[in-house]
């Protein structure tokens, strides 16, 4: 949801930048999730990356 929404908004304004937005969103998600226990994180992953 989050990554798709960011990409959708960006693709309407700057179509060539969608890949950059995906890469930055993925990096932000990885940074946010560092140090979080797997069992805590797993229930939230599907809605986040949907």
Image (cartoon, rainbow, N blue to C red):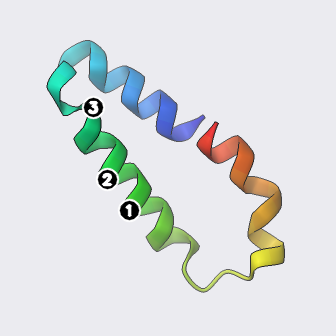
Tell me how far mark 1 sits from mark 2, CA to CA: 5 Å
- At which x and y percent is residue 32? 51, 69
- At which x and y percent is residue 20? 23, 43
Quarter of the image that includes the N terminus: top right
Name the element at disc 2.
helix
On residue 12, which mark appears? none
Tell me how far mark 3 sits from mark 1, CA to CA: 14 Å
Q: Do the residues under discs 3 and 1 have CB atoms within 8 angstroms? A: no
Name the element at disc 3.
helix
- Which one is earlier in the sequence, the residue at label 3 or at label 2? 3
User: Is residue 21 found left or right of 7 in the rendered image?
Assistant: left
Instruction: Say above or below: 41 vs 44.
Output: below
Please rate how many residues cluster around mark 2, counting C-alpha atoms within 10 Å: few if below 14, some from 14 to 19, many from 20: few
Q: Do the residues under discs 1 and 2 have CB atoms within 8 angstroms? A: yes
Give residue 36's quadrant in the image.
bottom right
Name the element at disc 1.
helix
- At which x and y percent is residue 34? 54, 80
- Which one is earlier in the sequence, the residue at label 3 or at label 1? 3
User: Is residue 20 found left or right of 6 in the rendered image?
Assistant: left
Q: Residue at (71%, 42%) from the top-left corner?
A: 47
| Residue occupying the far top of the picture | 12
Instruction: Say above or below: 40 vs 17.
Output: below
On residue 27, which mark appears? 1
Quarter of the image that includes the C terminus: top right
Give residue 31's quadrant in the image.
bottom left
- At which x and y percent is residue 17? 19, 32
Instruction: Say above or below: 11 vs 22.
Output: above
Tell me how far mark 3 sits from mark 2, CA to CA: 10 Å
User: Is residue 33 found left or right of 39 in the rendered image?
Assistant: left
- The residue carrying mark 3 is 18
On residue 24, which mark appears? 2
User: Is residue 33 found left or right of 16 in the rendered image?
Assistant: right
């Amino acid at each position: 949801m989050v990554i798709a929404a960011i990409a959708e908004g960006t693709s309407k304004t700057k179509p060539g930048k969608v890949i950059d937005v995906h890469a930055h969103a993925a990096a932000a998600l990885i940074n946010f999730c560092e140090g979080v226990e797997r069992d805590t994180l797993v229930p939230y992953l599907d809605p986040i990356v949907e």
